[in-house]
Image: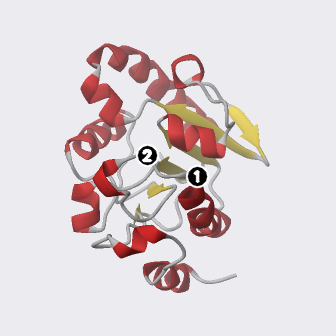
Amino acid sequence: MKTWDELKEACSSCTKCELHKTRTNVVFGVGNSTAEVLFIGEGPGESEDLKGEPFVGRAGRLLDDMLKIIGLSRTENIFIANIVKCRPPGNRDPLNTERELCYEWLKAQIDILKPKIIVCLGRIAAAVLINSDFKITQDHGKWFDIDGINYMALYHPAALLRDPNKKPDTFVDLKELERKIRETCKRTL
């Protein structure tokens, strides 16, 4: 197994799929590399590609506010990554082949981090990590135990920006996440 720094270096030079041809930066992730809680989105957008960090635009500011509600911080006690590490052109959904080829990087991150909780941000991340038929409108905020890791999906912050009516449900989900973190994680809150 690679060290965290070796993994990051190897990922930064990846050319497995066509996305490497149009990226500005590989978006490996951000946060505490010993975190017990891992947040995973689908892939970087334009702002993330330019900065090389996940969730930095309007959706990222909303995610930071959501984290603050339950005592989390992207720099202190969680790690944030994506299913794919390079921006799909035009911010389209990552193709199945791109997800499959990039999954090795995410799997290695999970193997090194050994998180106790994984939070999928949005339907696509949940479909890849929890269940291919995942229905975000029905299953957000529910817990799934997969190989001893607790998984939950939240609405993607961009979806909350498009439809603020989902925010009350997300607040309830965040409070449930906070409860589970207090119950499961020793170092996080």
Q: Which residue is mark 2?
A: 93
Above or below for 121 versus 103: above
Per the model, the C-alpha gap separating discs 2 and 1 is 9 Å
Q: Nearer the viewer, residue 126 or 90?
A: 90
SS assignment at label 1: helix
User: Which numbered tag is attached to residue 96?
Assistant: 1
Left or right of 58 in this view: 113: right
User: Which numbered tag is attached to residue 182?
Assistant: none
Q: Nearer the viewer, residue 117 or 104?
A: 104
The three-letter amino acid code for the residue at tag 2 is Asp
Q: Position of residue 114 (x, y in %)?
A: 66, 61
> How many marks on residues?
2
Above or below for 138 versus 121: above
Above or below for 150 versus 51: above
> In the current view of this chain or complex, which residue is farthest to the right?
147
Q: Nearer the viewer, residue 83 or 116?
A: 83
Q: Residue at x 34, y 29 (%)?
A: 159
Circles 2 and 1, Cβ within 8 Å, touching? The answer is no
**Quadrant in the rendering for residue 128:** top right
Quarter of the image with the N terminus is bottom right
Q: Position of residue 170 (x, y in %)?
A: 41, 23
**Quadrant in the rendering for residue 89:** bottom left
Q: Residues within 10 Å of mark 2 (few under 14, many from 20)?
A: some
Q: Residue at x 32, y 49 (%)?
A: 91
Above or below for 103 versus 189: below
Q: Position of residue 166 (x, y in %)?
A: 36, 17
Q: Residue at x 30, y 68 (%)?
A: 52
Q: Position of residue 141 (x, y in %)?
A: 55, 25
The three-letter amino acid code for the residue at tag 1 is Asn
